Image (cartoon, rainbow, N blue to C red):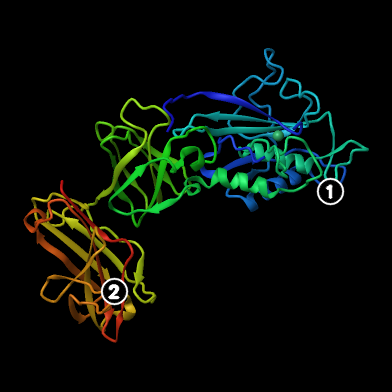
Amino acid sequence: MTSTKTALLLVLLGISLNAFAANIPGKKWPGNTTEMYIGMPGTAPSGIAWSDALRKAAQAWNDTTPFTFTFNSQFLDPCTGYSKNPANSNFPNGDGDSRNGTGFNTTVCGNDFGSGVLAVTLIYTESNLLGAEDITEADIVFNSNERYDIYDGPLRFQTRTQDFGRIALHELGHVLGLGHEQTASAIMKATIGNLDSLQEDDINGATTLYNGYRNCPVTSFGFGRSSGSLATGDCRVRELIGGGSDDSFVDTYEFELAQPTQITLEMRSPSLDSVLVLMDARSDVLDVDDDGAGGCNSRITTTLAAGTYAVLANTFDGKSDCGDTFGPYELTLSYQSSTLPLLGRETSLRGGSSTARFSGGVTQNGGLSYSNLAKSTQPVDIKGSIQVDSAHQGKAGFIVVAAVMDNGRIYLRNSVGEFVPYDQAGGVITKAYSKVLGAVENVDILRNFTPLVAGYPSAQVNFLMGYGLSSNPDELYFHAAPINLLTGL
Ligand SMILES: [Zn+2]
């Protein structure tokens, strides 16, 4: 996060074809998509409609990058919302109309194109929570003082006939946020050439711009607490978002929710000025917090739909008025639920598949509500529920309950309710109990367990439950996301 927050609306001019690396200023469309009005009237001498050539050029970007142009077949004058600017010969006046028009014009909405300029893309941006701006409008004005056709291959210098198709490819690259490439072979070079299709550099540039948080190493994360640190060598925000100038360190975590869930994220440090950023799977920023947990610590509480999300453990770029911009931190993800939480994907020990569904959670009020955060002075119950695969119902089977400690040690519950160390080398799975499997198996994973009394005033334990069939005792069906218990409140 940058330490300045501005809400400017600015106009940038993308002058093309005087000079065409992938230069990525970092500006981008939220949601990786925008609608282009492509209904330019008329047809090239070759017989191809301008609108078809525009659609083909946009489709080339769609087919090779994470960005998607959608199409509105109506004509929209790119100069809608703009007028001549007497103060500046390159910039038109006005705020546009928040729609992306395309068309021929003798001027850039009243201002001169300038010498040798074939087309101009007018881009509007507004400031974004992470520093690089969001693009809000991009209009392409083609210079109608030039002669155009649509063709492949070398430029037709003798007749000074421009290829509309490659110009459209180039300008659409500006629309999606690319600047000019200086060195590599690219459609985004500032001068037009014999290239008539997207090059590796163009595709890599747009992919980096729209890969979002996956541009940095991503650690998978679940409910509970983990430690990290922001330090030299970490990814930086400008790398994560594919542009901009934000040099602050960032660690990236990804988590999945199996159902709509109220979550709380906390980032705490004794020295670092923590900043939390919550993103959806498309890298759109959902929430940002700096000091919500008091001091220099941050907290986000929100309700999210089922899906994949990213948490960025971030700080400030350069100076902070609240602690350092590097150092250790603890990140905690917790939930609050009035029903037993669904545990997401099912998995198995030997690779067998099942339609079993698993739910489970920690309660300290007899099941009125569930959360992974528990007071160590009060009794904890951990409840589980298994919807058994219909093919397994009515068959002789067994239930297994495991506790995975923070140090990685695994304990399995035995038939008298004690957790005994699991000897992975031995490979024998200790069963909690055996029974004929019903449609739903309710499992009391832990009952009336007071962490402080049991010697766990502050601890993290992940619980798993599963079932197997007596006819295939080495296979176990269980859930990928553990039931987290974090004591010490
Ligand atoms: Zn250009």
Q: Position of residue 428 (x, y in %)?
A: 25, 79
306 sits left or right of 48 in the view? left
Rounded to the nearest angstrom, the CA distance separating label 1 from label 2 is 63 Å
**Quadrant of res 352:** bottom left
In the image, residue 400 above or below residue 269: below
Q: Position of residue 83 (x, y in %)?
A: 68, 20
Q: Position of residue 205 (x, y in %)?
A: 61, 44
Q: Is mark 2 within 8 Å of ligand 1?
A: no
For mark 1, give the secondary structure: loop
For mark 2, give the secondary structure: loop
**Residue named by callout 2:** 388
Q: Residues within 10 Å of mark 2 (few under 14, many from 20)?
A: many
Residue at 54% over, 41% down: 242
Which of the two residues, 119 or 486, is positioned nearer the viewer here? 486
Q: Residue extending furthest bottom?
A: 471
**Quadrant of res 351:** bottom left
Q: Position of residue 231 (x, y in %)?
A: 39, 41
Q: Is mark 1 within 8 Å of ligand 1?
A: no
Q: In this orientation, does residue 69 appear? A: no
Q: Earlier in the sequence, mark 1 or mark 2?
A: 1
Say which mark, if any, is on residue 456: none
Q: Residue extending furthest left?
A: 453
**Residue named by callout 1:** 153
Q: Nearer the viewer, mark 1 or mark 2?
A: 1
275 sits left or right of 137 in the view? left
Residue at 56% over, 43% down: 209
**Quadrant of res 182:** top right
Which of the two residues, 129 or 459, is positioned nearer the viewer here? 459
Quadrant for ligand 1 reads top right
Q: Residue extending furthest top?
A: 87
265 sits left or right of 24 in the view? left
Amino acid type, mark 1 = Gly
